[in-house]
Image: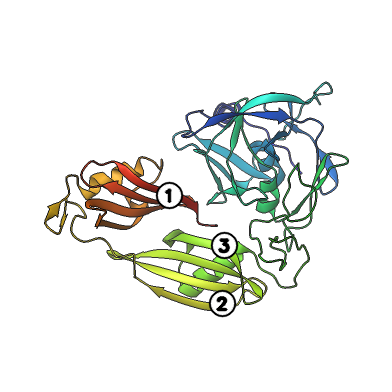
Amino acid sequence: MKKLVCTMALAALLCGAAGAANGSYSVTAELSPDITVKIDGVERVFYNVQGQEVHPISYAGTTYVPIRSIGELMDKNVNWDGTTNTATIAGARVTADATGTPDRNAVTQDITMDIEPGITIVIDGTARTFYNVNGQKVDPALYNGSIYLPIRAIGEIMGKTVSWDGATQTVSISGSTAGGQVTDFDTNNSSGGNTGNTGNVGGNTGNTGNVGGNTGTTTGSVTLEQAKQTALNHAGKTASQVTFVKARSDWENGRTVYEIEFIYRSGTGYLEYDYEIDASTGKILSYDYDAEGYAPSTGGTTGTGSIGGQTASISADRAKQIALAKVPGASTANIYEFKLDYDDGRLEYEGKIIYNTMEYEFSVDATTGNIIGWDVESIYD
């Protein structure tokens, strides 16, 4: 499999990702040269653009490798856009192989790296969010100017099995992309209870990972991405036309199902589509669509608006900008269910921002402009 090398221009971008990503913070992690990475049984060594060996990093039970190494494993190009803090993995590789000298003197040591929730990872056109074995979001990291991702992401992206051998400190990534099972990799957990990106609940199983500790294989099981595509095809929509509000697995009536929800902008309003799909067969179990809850707000959409004789001091547009300021990259096109409401004796603007697989529910005081309510969750929860 080809190894990744940055051109000097790309290195200046990708290997020098700006530390200006919003919400970044520093943590103490461990440089772990004793961890071996094997791909389809072959041990892999990774190098940076200077030909120096780069080693895995362990933090909070998760092992990270450079995004350039992931691009190498996928045989895809890796690009960095500093204006949007976005790293992109896509397209057949066109750069030459990286070479270097193995670091024979490397030792395990504590290091400081930055966690960068403001960096967006886009893979083949889709913004990706990564999770650990407990379903908690795992953000990209930055160390020595290089972006690092959890190694579990490799298996999720490639549809391969990721396993951990604690006795030999070895991560193994293997299997074909067709029907490959994605299991979790966790340096502090070498058995059971692992989850893939698509998951399953209540001990039921499949090639889509598991929740509840069961790890068998169910013939004909489908992935979450396949279920999303099934719903889109049925609705006659494409992924670029909709915004996903929910995409997750659940346990219902003795089987694992996928709950898929997305919204489609229609004229001045919105249509909400809800699907329930069998995770084993891919069959649509139920669906519906309506505009309830997604119609544009009335009275104060662009002006100040009023309710019960009280008039808001700030405009709806201003309230939207206040909320959007907390979600870099989002725009008014990402705001839904926005309205002026009267609650607890005051006027307030309420709404949701759906952006990059996350849903932000907010309330803004219509008199002071202060954010008085803020809740964040992944659409995959």
Element on which disc 1 rests:
strand
- The amino acid type found where label 1 is placed reads Asp
Q: Mark 1 or mark 3: which is in front?
A: 1
Element on which disc 3 rests:
strand
**Mark 3 touches mark 2? (CB < 8 Å):** no
Is disc 1 surrounded by few (<14), some (14 to 19) or many (20+) residues within 10 Å? few
Residue 233 x, y percent position in the rendering: 51, 71
Q: Residue furthest left?
A: 309
Residue at point 54% right, 68% down? 259
Mark drawn on residue 375: 1
Residues 17 and 350: in front is: 350
Residue 46 x, y percent position in the rendering: 74, 33
The residue beneath circle 2 is 284
The residue beneath circle 3 is 248
Element on which disc 2 rests:
strand
- The amino acid type found where label 2 is placed reads Ile
Mark drawn on residue 199: none
Residue at point 52% right, 39% down? 117
Q: Earlier in the sequence, mark 3 or mark 2?
A: 3
Mark 1–mark 3 distance (CA, rounded to whole Å): 19 Å
Q: Mark 1 or mark 2: which is in front?
A: 1
Locate the C terminus and report the quarter of the image it occupies. Answer: bottom right
Mark 1–mark 2 distance (CA, rounded to whole Å): 31 Å
Q: Mark 3 or mark 2: which is in front?
A: 3
